[in-house]
Amino acid sequence: MVGMPGALPEDEIPFGMEDVIPRISTVAECCEQIPDDLDSLGPGPVLAGFLASIDVSTLSGTDQIVVLRAHRRMASHYQGHMYRDIAAVTQTMADRGRDDGDAIDAHREAEAEIGVGLHMSRRAAENEVAFAVRLRKRLPRLSDMLTAGIIDVQRARTIDRYTLHLTDVAAQAVLDQIADDAPTLTVGELRNQIQKLTIQVDPHEAAKRYEQAVGDRRVVMESNDAGTANLSGMDLAPDQVAAVTDRINTIAKDLCGEDESRTMDQLRADIYLDLLTGNNHQTTRKGVVDIRVDLTTLIGLEDSPGELAGYGPLIADVARRVVNNANDAEWRVTILDPVTGQPTHAGTTSRRPAAAQRRRVEIRDAACIFPGCRMPASRSDIDHMIAVDDGGATTDENLAPLCRYHHTLKHRHGWTYRRTDTGDYVWTTGLGQVIMTARPPP
């Protein structure tokens, strides 16, 4: 990783770094490169000083990504300390000679002090204080991960939010199970993993929460500044939402053509309103909704969560109901071996995958295999890992689902990928980064 960091002018050196930065700049100029271990260098004065001495515009694209990750570690480090400071102020207010009956009042006083000190609204101060206190008391390991730059605030908030309904012990257990994977998961992937684990921790409590939420289902209308309006259905059954969404997508694809000037988003919005106002659209194609569930869950021996492509985890009762009652859309139900989690497949030799072969590929890979993408495989292209023109065969082993956006990205910008023996995918980006798309554990 070669690059020439440029030394900062003396009047631009951050306060407190006067001794550190010159030493780092001297080392950097002698080596004329970014250290090979920069990705593993923890946040602190040394990393801060080195980053302050870098002229990122002189670096290669690969080195710029490494520096970007280092800056994010430093940002997480400082944010972690900020939340520790907020928790410390809150504790100071609580320790000012008040008895237990005044604990709430002390909390409110802390919120007021912090709100004034940081120029926050009352609501913003309440939210920040509550999050900081939960990090300190409820999830101390998460606080340590944030301060160490292992995860960022967005991921920390996701873990906090989706374990909030659990007991402290259960929340800490879930955190322990996802801590190693959390830094490399997108927020959506992280949320899904947490939801699966929380269902597994207490399936009966998860089912109870689901029923309570569905009992609060409603339709909400809100106005926008531009004079438009939003119409949202809240707390609906996910299988029904998936079926409706797929029907809208299927109709939109039927209408899309050379003479159609509307975008897909505009088509979906118009179809949504047409269906609600009684202007029904007819389509000859069946939509496809893909659900996965363990055999032991399906027959009622266990209550492990199912997986609805494009949505995420389902509680066991909903997964079983979907399998038993599926009718209108084409519900693709994949029964997984609870031990291996892998369906079997075979290959063909034609250039274009046949319907049965596409189905096998979609069973194996439920979503686009690009890192972090969750587009269902049933709505993705089937890509040849090695192109036919380069000798690639149309076999199951050489095929994988890629959504249209990432399919185009791969071919236009020279990205490549390969499948490992464990079924994971290893991508090499245009800049040469190597990234793994890991399959969820069976």
Image: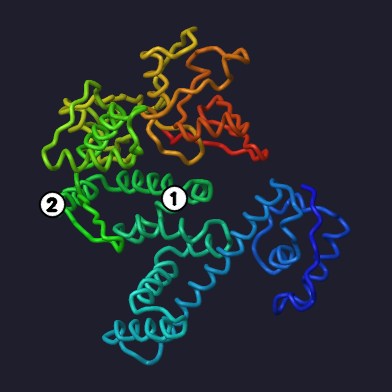
Instruction: Residue lying at the far top in this picture: please name it.
Output: 349
Q: Position of residue 328 (x, y in %)?
A: 17, 26
* Residue 51 relative to residue 320: left or right: right
Q: Earlier in the sequence, mark 2 or mark 1?
A: 1
As displayed, is residue 127 above or below residue 424? Answer: below
Instruction: State how far apart marks 2 and 1 are (Cα).
Output: 28 Å
358, above or below 35, in the image = above
Q: Position of residue 435 (x, y in %)?
A: 59, 39
- Find residue 425 and report its image quarter: top right
Where 99 falls versus 73 (above or below)? below
Residue matched to label 1: 187
Left or right, 430 with respect to 323, comes to right
The foreground one among 423 and 294 is: 423
Q: Secondary structure at mark 2?
A: helix
> Considering the image in quadrants, where does the C terminus appear?
top left
Identify the image quadrant of residue 299: top left
Q: Residue at x 37, y 92 (%)?
A: 97
Residue 4 appears in the figure: yes
Taking the spot 58% from the left edge, 65% from the top edge, the residue there is 77
x, y percent for residue 215: 13, 51
Residue drawn 63% across and 34% down?
428
> Circles 2 and 1: CB distance less than 8 Å?
no
Outermost residue toward the front?
259
Q: How many marks?
A: 2
Residue 293 visible, this orientation: no
Graded by Cα atoms within 10 Å as few (under 14), some (14 to 19) or many (20 or more), the crowding at tag 1 reads some
Disc 2: CA contacts within 10 A as few (<14), some (14-19) or many (>=20): few
User: Label 1 sits on what residue type?
Assistant: Val
Residue 247 sits in quarter: top left
Res. 215 mark: 2
For this orientation, the residue located farthest to the right is 30
Across and down, in percent, residue 282 comes to: 18, 26
